[in-house]
Image (cartoon, helix red, strand yellow):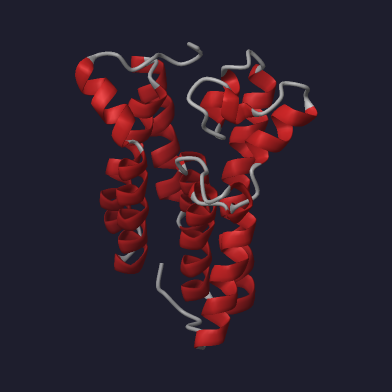
Amino acid sequence: MPMHGDGPGLVLLLAAAGGYLMGSIPFGLILTRLAGHGDIRGIGSGNIGATNVLRTGDKRLALATLVLDGGKGAVAALLAARWGGETASLFAAAAAVFGHNFPIWLGFRGGKGVATTLGVLLAIAWPVGLAALALWIAGALAFRISSLAALIALTASPLMMLALADVPRAVLAGLLAALGIARHHANIRRLLAGSEPKIGQK
C-alpha cells in the first residue's frame, strides 16, 4: 500500500480541520437525548461513547452510536483521500479521533476514541481495521470488559499496520494507540485493582 498524493500545506490543514469537525460530532449525546434518556454525561462513566450509551439499557442505541462514531472516522479519512491524497487522509484520520476525544462543542471533553480509531483503521488499511475489530470483539466476548478489549486492539494495531501496510500508517496507528491508552488511564487503574465494571454494568 504505497503512499501517494502528498498535498500542499493548505490541503493538509483543510483535511485536518474537516476531520476534526467531523470527529467532534457527539453522536452518543445526540442519540441519547433524542431517545429521551437525557444527557449521557450524567449516566455511568459520563462518557459519550457506545459503552456508556449501553448503560441506558438500549442496545440498539449503543450499536448506532458505535457505528456512527466509527463511521465518522472512516468518512473523514476516505473523503480526505479522495480530495487530497493519502497523506491528507492520515491527517484527517488523526484529527477525527482527536475531535471525538476533545470536541469543541463539549468544552473539549469527549470520549476515548476507540470506535473512531477502529473506523479510521478500516478506512486507511482495511485488513488491519478488520483484524483490530476482530481483536476487540474477541476481547469483549472473552473478558466482558470493554476497556480491556479496547486496550488489546489498540496495542496490537501499530504492529499489525507495520506488518500489513507501511510505516506512515503504522506511525499513525501508534499515535492513536498511545492517545487511546492515555485516555483509558482510569480504566487501567481499575483493571489493576480488579474493580473495572463489565459490559452493561451501571
Does residue 81 appear in the picture of this structure?
Answer: no
* Image point (68%, 25%), residue name: 61
Q: Quadrant of residue 36?
A: top right
Q: Is residue 18 above or below residue 69?
A: below
Expressed as whole percent of the image width and height from the top left, the position of residue 127 reads 43, 48
Expressed as whole percent of the image width and height from the top left, the position of residue 44 reads 51, 20
Expressed as whole percent of the image width and height from the top left, the position of residue 174 reads 30, 55
Q: Give the camera-side residue of 57 and 124.
A: 57
- Quadrant location of the N terminus in the rendered image: bottom left
* Image point (52%, 32%), residue name: 47
54 displayed left or right of 150:
right
Expressed as whole percent of the image width and height from the top left, the position of residue 136 reads 40, 31
114 displayed left or right of 170:
right
Q: Is residue 36 above or below residue 105?
A: above
In the current view of this chain or complex, which residue is farthest to the left? 192
Q: Quadrant of residue 43?
A: top right
Q: Is residue 83 above or below residue 79?
A: below
* Image point (66%, 35%), residue name: 29
* Image point (31%, 60%), residue name: 170
Q: Is residue 121 above or below residue 90?
A: above
Does residue 27 appear in the picture of this structure?
Answer: yes
